[in-house]
Image (cartoon, rainbow, N blue to C red):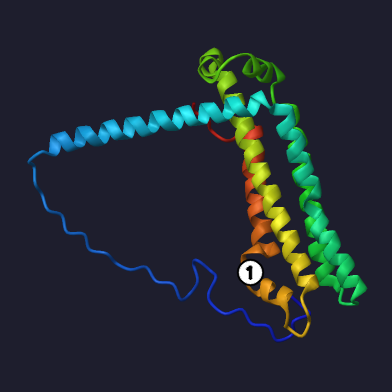
Amino acid sequence: MSKFKDTKVNGNGNQFGDNNTLSHVTNHHHHNDGGGSTRNNKKEEDALGVSLGLLFGVAALVWLFFSHLDQIYFYLQIITLSSAIPAIAAVLVMHARQELDNIDMARFGGSVLLMVGLFGLLVLADNHASREIAAFAQQVGVMDFYQGLTEHGKELAVMNFVAALLLGVAAVCAHLGGFRQLIYALADANQTGFWYRLYQRTPGMGMRVTGSLAVVFASIAGAALTGYLPSSM
């Protein structure tokens, strides 16, 4: 960021950077047929148990989501709309300190555009959610809810749940990016003090990272809402 003229970030934060290498691992296989069938059966039983547990867990989460559909979307809207507040505060602080430049305004504009885009997708997801399924979820338990839905109903329910979850995560990412901007605004240009140390320790909260993640999550949510994300339940 621009006001720290000589700041250097130590370490390679790029997962696929030039300094990374892929180690070659040689696997030595020892064959022992004794008891192999029993172990395989045990693994299959364990895998089946895990699969059934995951299926029930997803069904329970979807049921809980639709049981409180309006409340959840209300809070998601608040979280999304407030995601630009830290960025607004950052601009005000930098303007008061006469440290505001074009790059800072670009970051602020990015935060606002991200908030608007996420809120638009959230409204789409809210409108997409079936109130009929929500009413049904409020009347029955999780197992009756799962068994009472048609295959199409299950797909709609899962996709809307996934979209809402991803949009919520995207809004959290937007908040983190905005808070990083605020931390930067509060940091001393002389590279001293609490806020500067906090800024140094939070490189993963930068707008490039959090904004990119938010866009990825929002894109997947949009795919779920438009039927481009496969579902099986």
Q: Amino acid at mark 1?
A: Pro
Q: Is residue 216 visible?
A: yes
In which quadrant will I find the N terminus?
Answer: bottom right
The local crowd at label 1, few if under 14, some if 14 to 19, many if 20 or more residues have their Cα within 10 Å, is: some
Image-based side of 166 in relation to 38, left or right: right
Q: Is residue 227 visible?
A: no
Q: Quadrant of residue 72?
A: top right
193, 93: nearer the viewer: 193
Please identify the residue farthest to the front as the structure is shown: 194
Residue in the image at 56% along x and 30% along y: 61
52, 31: nearer the viewer: 52
Question: Which x, y percent locates residue 232?
Answer: 49, 28
Image-based side of 222 in relation to 101, left or right: left
Q: Is residue 4 above or below residue 164?
A: below
Q: Is residue 174 above or below residue 123?
A: below
Residue in the image at 66% along x and 63% along y: 205
Residue in the image at 10% along x and 49% along y: 31
Residue in the image at 68% along x and 42% along y: 167
177, 197: nearer the viewer: 197
Question: Which x, y percent locates residue 49?
Answer: 34, 30
Q: Quadrant of residue 25?
A: bottom left
Question: Which x, y percent locates residue 132?
Answer: 69, 16
Q: Quadrant of residue 208?
A: bottom right
Q: Is residue 113 above or below residue 224?
A: below
Question: Which x, y percent locates residue 135?
Answer: 68, 16
Image-based side of 74 in relation to 65, left or right: right
Element on which disc 1 rests = helix
Instruction: From the image, tell me which residue sits under label 1.
Output: 203
Q: How many marks?
A: 1
